[in-house]
Amino acid sequence: MTVGAVDRNDSLAPFSSRGPRPGDEAVKPDVTAPGVGIVAARAAGTAMGTPVDEHYVAASGTSMATPHVAGAAALLAQRHPEWTAARLKDALISSAVTVDGQKVTEQGGGRIDARAAVLGAVSATGTLALGPFTSEATGPEVSRVRYTNSSDKDVILSLDADLATEGGRKPAEGSVRLGADSLKVPANSSAEVLLTVDPARVGQGKFYGYVTAASSDGTVLAQTVSVLVQGPIHRITLKSVDKDGRPAGDLPTIWGADGFVGYTDPAAAVAEVEEGVYQVNTSWIDAADDGQELRHAVIPEVKVTRDMTVTLDARDTVPVEIRTPRPAEQRGILSYQTYREIGGRGLTQGTMFFDSAKRLYISPTARVTEGTFEFASRWQLVAPLLKAKVKKTQVGLGAYYLPMSPLLPESGGTLTAVDAGDADKPVFTEVRGRIAVVNNPSGENEKAFVERAAKAGARAVLVIHFDDNGWTRWQPMGERWAVPTIRIGASEGAGLLARIARRSTSVEFSGTARSPYLYDVMQVARQQVPRKVVHTVSASNSAVVPTTYADNGVSGWAAEQRFGWRPYQRTAWNQYTRFVPLGFARTEYVSADDTVWQHRVHHTTTFFVDEPIAHGMLDQPRTFRAGRLPGETWQGAIVRPSIPVGTSTPTVREGNLLRLRIPEFTDSQPGHWSRRSAGEGLGEVPQGDVVSADLYRDGEKVAGVSSAWQDIGVPDAPARYRLDLSTARESEDWKASVATRTSWSFRSGHSKEATPLPLLQLDYDVPVDARNAVDGGRPHRIEVKVRAQKGLATPRGVKLRVEASYDDGRTWTTARTTAHGHLGFRASLTTPAQRRTWVTLRVTASDSAGNTVRQTVQRAYSVRR
């Protein structure tokens, strides 16, 4: 038997595999069973799943669902030892509970019902896989459904059959029919009913459903039925033509309701397909004067009713235009994707490429009438990093910074270009105050001749690459080279050298690495790609988010990404790490509508930039409404442990388990949080975070507690608990909130349902700038709000004390604190004026129920002189 997994509400688990079975398209799974959060025996010394206590563990998977079915089969075999394996299987399938809203190919017979299977009087054939038939079949096909009555009384069953395609289309009237509407099954005997299928009348397709049998006592048996009727076979020949009109050597992809189609004659690009609807597509990467171009040709709805030839022509593609309020260029991964759904089955195909791709082309399509189609492209656009052209001309050089180059002045400028010869024997006698142009046909030893040029007084170096594409990627981390160094392609380089040989030639530069704006764009075309594909970024189709990236250290740069995915995707893909300056604010435009976004920001750069960023603070996945939104700050003071507002993983008591889910780091923005970084993996995190936790029950330490993100088994009786959590950040790139100590005191007892624990939370509002600093020598006020977790009553009788230290905790001053708003407090602090220093905070709060919290944040924010 094939088993799927459901939760306690009989909802299908996301990880549960779906059918139908490839090949004959039969119903799979056969049944489902509970497989989410199943508590089972725990082997000593193991840590699989979520430990409940030393004896039990909770885990999810079809591996947890299958034992339920095996156990039900054992009970059934014990009651009927004479039954064959096939009969046991039939009884389990036919007695299962079908769940509304789940497809037959998702649940099979439904969630098993051990009591109904073992104690039920009647069982039936469990599943019927009929076909494949051809729509040109000459006559009906007959199958039998058997019912067996193991009781000592006759049973009358009311019968019905209901089938449809996964798209909702039903067979023609009378083409699938039972031999009777009711059936008498004698005591301790069996009876059969005929099920007749007339393929010629059913219609081409895959039909799924149930034959149900209901008895007078309300018992309902359900047998899964699949009917596969295939249409005529036709030959389809695929041709692809490149942008220059020449035959391309690739074999386009063919995909339909039954999946991908292989070629029967690859040399002739011929495939044999069943009559129906298919999508064909192919793609190209072409060289351009300034980089590369991506092209994708797709025909999403090819209706095959005869032998035919289909051509995909790159010359028919049109550019995808992204128009922005201010000049911008694509930086980072450029990706696009198509989604196609035919007959209930979906396919997402995508391509990603580096930002050397300067343009994207897509083929216009007719409007899709059967199923769903979408084309989407993902853009990450910022102010140009570097523009270089010959002065007093429009001749662009297609220039790129080398990875370790210093940056030219953001204000732009002009430098006289000097031919310094080839890289193996450069001549730097006339480069002082100018830009040295070095031809480097080998692409080697660049750093060495750049250092020589700098010593000779060159202001910058321009390297001519051996290839026409001079693309490379600048990065902010690592030791800088001696002078700004840029690279251009071979063709541009040859033209520049020819100009220098004729007359004095200057090169104009402009650009910035600190773009004041970002356009996070998801361009979408639904059901059809139009003749012109233009997406104009504006406040009417984008969320406008003023965003600050606070600086807590010395690195100067952070790693970030706003991952975006469409409703048909489970998560984002093809979106890799970006860089952003710290202590910096920019305006970010994010495509609104139904694209889901999630932002992650790490406080320093990461090593693997060609992978999705895996560290740093993140927010909850969300869609955006168009228009201007309130400002957002990342890594803003005060960074400390807390349970974020609106978290999807609250800290609760469930039974005798404390399910602790307290992120070690949250910032000033509600909803931002991160776990500790381990500091492992080829420099991804230079140094890790140190975290420790202790839990006390009525003053006695509870064993096995190492963090505030784990499940802890505790005794049933009510008790007073204290949870202590300490963090320390050892990275040299982090200077603020370097250590925290938080202690929560609360009462808890057994709870049948998951109930939030009464851990008082502290939210801070500090008037810091983008470098998490305040002015010294003058008073400033911080605001602190006390709250309970969502789902708990508002705390009553809240008291709060704020203490500050300006010498790392050696001495403390109690701040004057007054109530301010609902459960809010305002504390006045006066910082020293004579020196730059840090503010260490200690805040203590309590409520009338006896819940308390004390939180100390070392170097919570800084004080400017």
Image (cartoon, rainbow, N blue to C red):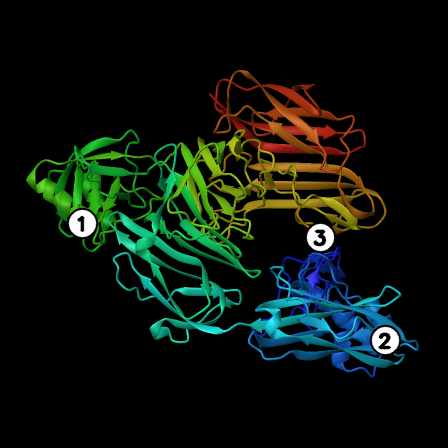
Number of the front mark, 3 or 1: 1
Dot label at residue 491: 1
Q: Is residue 176 left or right of residue 522?
A: right
How many numbered discs? 3
Q: Is residue 719 above or below residue 141?
A: above
> Amino acid type of disc 3?
Gly
Can residue 120 be seen in the rendering of this structure? yes
Cα distance in 3D space between marks 1 and 2: 88 Å
The picture places residue 290, in percent across and down from the top left corner, at: 26, 47
> Amino acid type of disc 1?
Ser
Instruction: Say whether disc 3 or disc 1 marks the residue closer to the N-terminus.
Output: 1
Instruction: Say whether disc 2 or disc 3 marks the residue closer to the N-terminus.
Output: 2
What residue do we see at 28% from left, 56% from top?
Answer: 243
* Pointers 1 and 2 in contact (C-beta within 8 Å): no
Q: Is residue 425 left or right of residue 90?
A: left
Can residue 682 be seen in the rendering of this structure? no
The picture places residue 76, in percent across and down from the top left corner, at: 82, 75
Q: Is residue 218 left or right of residue 408?
A: right
* Residue lying at the far left of the rendered structure: 502
Quadrant of the rendered image containing residue 392: top left
- Category of crowding for the residue at label 1, using alpha-carbon neighbours closer than 10 angstroms: few (below 14), some (14–19), many (at least 20): some
- Disc 2 target residue: 184
> Amino acid type of disc 2?
Lys
The picture places residue 308, in percent across and down from the top left corner, at: 39, 68
Say what secondary structure mark 2 lies in: strand
The picture places residue 358, in percent across and down from the top left corner, at: 32, 47
Say what secondary structure mark 3 lies in: loop
- Disc 3 target residue: 704
- Category of crowding for the residue at label 2, using alpha-carbon neighbours closer than 10 angstroms: few (below 14), some (14–19), many (at least 20): some
Number of the front mark, 1 or 2: 2
* Residue lying at the far right of the rendered structure: 152
